C-alpha cells in the first residue's frame, strides 16, 4: 500500500512529504494548467523531484505514437525518477511497448475507465495503470468493482503493473480504492489533510490535555 500526491504545487509536496506518508507524485496537464503565469514544466518537475525521492509522473500531450515517444524521451532525460504518463489508446499502447522494452523508460497508462483497457495496458508492459475512480462513478459504474476485477486479473496472470487509483473526490474514494485492491492511491493535498483528522480524535486529545493542565494548575504534578 502506497500513497502518492496528485499535485503540481511544490508547497503541497513539501508539506506532505514531511509527514512521511507520501512516496510519489502524479501530475497531469489539467493540474499544470491551474498554475498561475508563465511556467517551465521542467523547472517545476525538477523542484518537485528535489522534495520527493520517488516516482514522479509527467504526462505526454501528443496523440500519436511518434509524438508520445519523442515527448517521453525528453521528459525522462530530466531525471531518472520520472515516469511517463501515457494516455490509454492504441497509439499509447504502442508507445508503452517501445518505451518500456526498448528505452528502459517507466510508463503510467492513464485515464483507464474499464478492466479491458487495464488488461491491454498491463500486457503492453506498463509499470503503472491509473484507474480514474470518480470519473468511473460519473458514468454510473462502481469503480471498486473495476479495481477489484483488475487486481484479480493482474494477480492470476502474474503481470507486473501496479494499480494507481486516481480521480479522488471524496475521502471514501481512498478507503474504497485500497479495499478493492489498489496498490497506490494518488490523493489531492486537501484529502490527505482530511485523512489525518477526526472530530472525536480532536475531542479526545483535548479532554486528556485539559485534565493534565488541571493537575498542573492544582500543583498535583511533581516537577521531575
Ligand atoms: C491522476 O493520475 C489523475 O491525473 C487525476 O487524479 C485525475 O483527477 P480528476 O478526475 O479529478 O481530473
Image: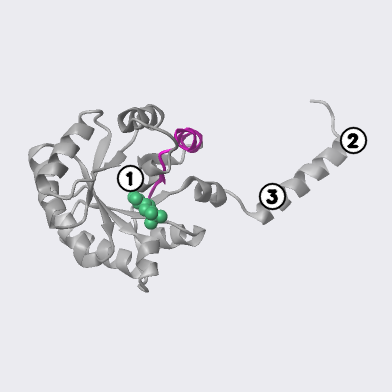
SS category of the residue bearing label 2: helix
Q: Who's the residue at 82% across and 44% down the image?
A: 211
User: Residue 217: which disc?
Assistant: 2
* Residues packed near mark 1 inside 10 Å, few (<14), some (14 to 19) or many (20 plus): few
Q: Which residue is mark 1?
A: 29
Report, in whole angstroms, how far the alpha carbon at label 2 lies from the one at label 3.
22 Å
Q: Is residue 100 left or right of residue 80?
A: left
Percent from the top left, x then y, of residue 84? 23, 42
Where in the figure is residue 43, as x and y percent of width and height?
34, 27
Residue range (magenta): 1-18
The residue drawn where x is 49% and y is 33% is 11
**In this view, 94 is above or below 105:** below
Pick the residue in front: 1 or 194. 194
Q: Are marks 1 and 2 in contact (CB under 8 Å)?
A: no
- Name the element at disc 3: helix
Q: Mark 2 vs mark 3: which is more N-terminal? A: 3
Q: Quadrant of residue 28?
A: top left
* Marks 3/1: CA–CA distance: 37 Å
In the image, residue 58 lies in the stretch drawn in magenta: no
Residue 1, image x, y percentages:
38, 50
Q: CA distance from mark 1 to mark 2?
A: 56 Å
Looking at the image, which is closer to me, 29 or 195? 29
User: What crowding class fits label 2: few (fewer than 14 Cα within 10 Å), some (14-19), or many (20 or more)?
Assistant: few
Left or right: residue 145 versus residue 14 is left
Q: Which residue is the site of mark 3? A: 202
Amino acid at each position: 500500500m502506497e500513497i502518492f500526491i496528485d499535485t503540481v504545487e511544490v508547497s503541497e509536496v513539501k508539506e506532505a512529504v514531511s509527514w512521511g506518508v507520501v512516496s510519489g507524485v502524479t501530475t497531469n496537464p489539467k493540474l499544470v494548467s491551474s498554475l498561475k503565469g508563465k511556467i517551465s514544466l521542467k523547472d517545476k518537475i525538477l523542484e518537485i523531484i528535489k522534495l520527493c525521492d520517488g516516482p514522479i509522473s509527467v504526462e505526454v500531450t501528443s496523440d500519436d505514437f511518434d509524438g508520445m515517444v519523442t515527448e517521453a524521451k525528453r521528459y525522462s532525460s530530466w531525471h531518472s525518477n520520472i515516469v511517463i504518463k501515457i494516455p490509454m489508446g492504441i497509439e499509447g499502447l504502442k508507445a508503452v511497448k517501445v518505451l518500456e522494452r526498448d528505452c528502459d523508460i517507466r510508463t503510467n497508462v492513464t485515464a483507464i475507465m474499464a478492466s479491458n483497457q487495464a488488461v491491454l495496458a498491463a500486457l503492453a508492459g506498463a509499470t503503472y495503470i491509473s484507474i480514474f475512480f470518480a470519473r468511473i462513478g460519473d458514468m454510473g459504474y462502481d469503480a471498486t468493482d473495476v479495481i477489484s476485477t483488475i487486481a484479480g486479473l493482474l494477480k492470476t496472470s502474474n503481470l507486473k503493473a501496479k494499480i494507481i487509483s486516481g480521480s479522488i473526490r471524496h475521502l471514501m474514494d481512498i478507503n474504497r480504492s485500497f479495499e478493492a485492491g489498489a496498490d497506490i492511491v494518488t490523493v489531492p493535498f486537501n484529502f490527505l489533510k482530511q485523512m489525518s483528522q477526526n472530530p472525536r480524535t480532536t475531542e479526545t486529545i483535548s479532554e486528556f490535555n485539559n485534565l493534565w493542565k488541571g493537575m498542573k494548575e492544582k500543583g498535583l504534578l511533581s516537577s521531575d
